[in-house]
């Protein structure tokens, strides 16, 4: 009588769980043998959870029973096999979902069948598709149009900054404030306009130099990359950079040698003039 009651309870539990070791194995077999994603019941995940919980309950209930060792080991082995089946099933479905997302990102086709996706899997698919599509547009499409690649994060930050700038309220300006603003705008215009007067800061004033010897690539004070340069090559560089090059004897300011050369003839002329005067006096 007691055995019959236990048997009925197990059958009811099986009916409630609606999944067994055999059904799990069959689901995995179909997923392995077929290329397309296989449809599952919407309650599949919850059914699996209840099934695994039932196995764990059986194992824990038999820990203190003297003659249940064999049954416990059997349940433990079956639980390990169940976990292996579930992991392989997830891996195979995950790979198929990734391929679906790649195909949609590449083709933007509306005929890709996603009906077999579980609710949780749809979220994964949509996230993958969005990421792949945005990166593909920002990198590949820009490169094909001879533009610099841009990541979704870079685009998001640029959009955020533009939005913040557009939302800043305009502050009322007094006459003095208006004059200050105009002055600041003029200074900014001069800094940005390459044909206007250069700022007085040595780090940004450029000087034309001629290199006296080959100079390898180097990093400037603002982490800019300069070079490499060949001997007798000329270049406009920030004054601070020029000062270091001149101090090390690697370059000279272009025009210094010309000035020296132009001054030499005049010195010679003065010497000739002096000699001529001395000859006349004698």
Image (cartoon, rainbow, N blue to C red):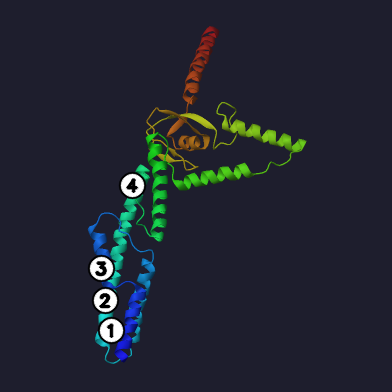
Q: Secondary structure at mark 3?
A: helix
Give the number of the disc on residue 103: 4
Instruction: Say whether marks 1 and 4 touch (CB < 8 Å).
Output: no
Q: Residue furthest left?
A: 33
Label 1 belongs to which residue?
72
Point out the image quarter for the N terminus. Answer: bottom left
The picture places residue 237, in percent across and down from the top left corner, at 48, 33
The picture places residue 105, in percent across and down from the top left corner, at 37, 46
Label 2 belongs to which residue?
78
Q: Residue 138: which quarter of the image? A: top left
Q: Secondary structure at mark 1?
A: helix
Residue 201 drawn above or below residue 57: above
- At a point 55% along the width and 46% down the height, the residue shown is 160
Between 275 and 244, the one lying in front of the other is 244
Between 85 and 142, the one lying in front of the other is 85
- At a point 69% along the width and 33% down the height, the residue shown is 182
Label 3 – label 4 distance at C-alpha = 29 Å
Label 3 belongs to which residue?
25
* Marked residue nearer the N-terminal end (1 or 3): 3
* Marked residue nearer the N-terminal end (3 or 2): 3
Relative side of 185 to 71, left or right: right
- At a point 62% along the width and 34% down the height, the residue shown is 188
Label 3 – label 2 distance at C-alpha = 12 Å
């Amino acid at each position: 009588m007691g055995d019959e009651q236990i048997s009925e309870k197990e059958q009811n539990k099986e009916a409630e769980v609606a999944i067994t070791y055999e059904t799990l194995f069959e689901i995995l077999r179909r997923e392995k043998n077929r290329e397309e994603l296989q449809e599952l019941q919407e309650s599949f995940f919850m059914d699996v959870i209840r099934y695994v919980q039932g196995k764990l309950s059986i194992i824990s209930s038999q820990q203190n029973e003297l003659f249940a060792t064999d049954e416990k080991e059997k349940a433990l082995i079956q639980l390990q096999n169940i976990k292996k089946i579930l992991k392989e099933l997830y891996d195979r479905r995950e790979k198929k979902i990734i391929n679906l997302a790649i195909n949609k990102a590449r083709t933007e086709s509306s005929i890709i069948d996603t009906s077999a996706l579980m609710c949780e899997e749809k979220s994964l698919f949509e996230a993958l598709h969005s990421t792949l599509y945005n990166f593909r547009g920002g990198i590949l499409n820009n490169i094909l149009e001879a533009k610099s690649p841009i990541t979704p994060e870079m685009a998001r930050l640029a959009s955020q900054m533009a939005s913040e700038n557009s939302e800043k309220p305009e502050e009322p300006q007094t006459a003095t404030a208006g004059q200050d603003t105009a002055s600041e705008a003029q200074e900014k215009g001069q800094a940005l306009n390459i044909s206007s007067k250069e700022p007085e800061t040595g780090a940004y004033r450029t000087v034309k130099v001629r290199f006296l010897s080959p100079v390898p690539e180097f990093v400037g004070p603002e982490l800019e990359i300069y070079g490499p340069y060949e001997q007798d090559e000329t270049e406009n560089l920030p004054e601070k950079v020029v000062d270091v090059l001149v101090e090390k004897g690697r370059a000279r300011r272009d025009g210094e040698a010309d000035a020296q050369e132009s001054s030499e003839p005049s010195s010679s002329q003065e010497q000739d003039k002096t000699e001529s005067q001395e000859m006349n006096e004698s």
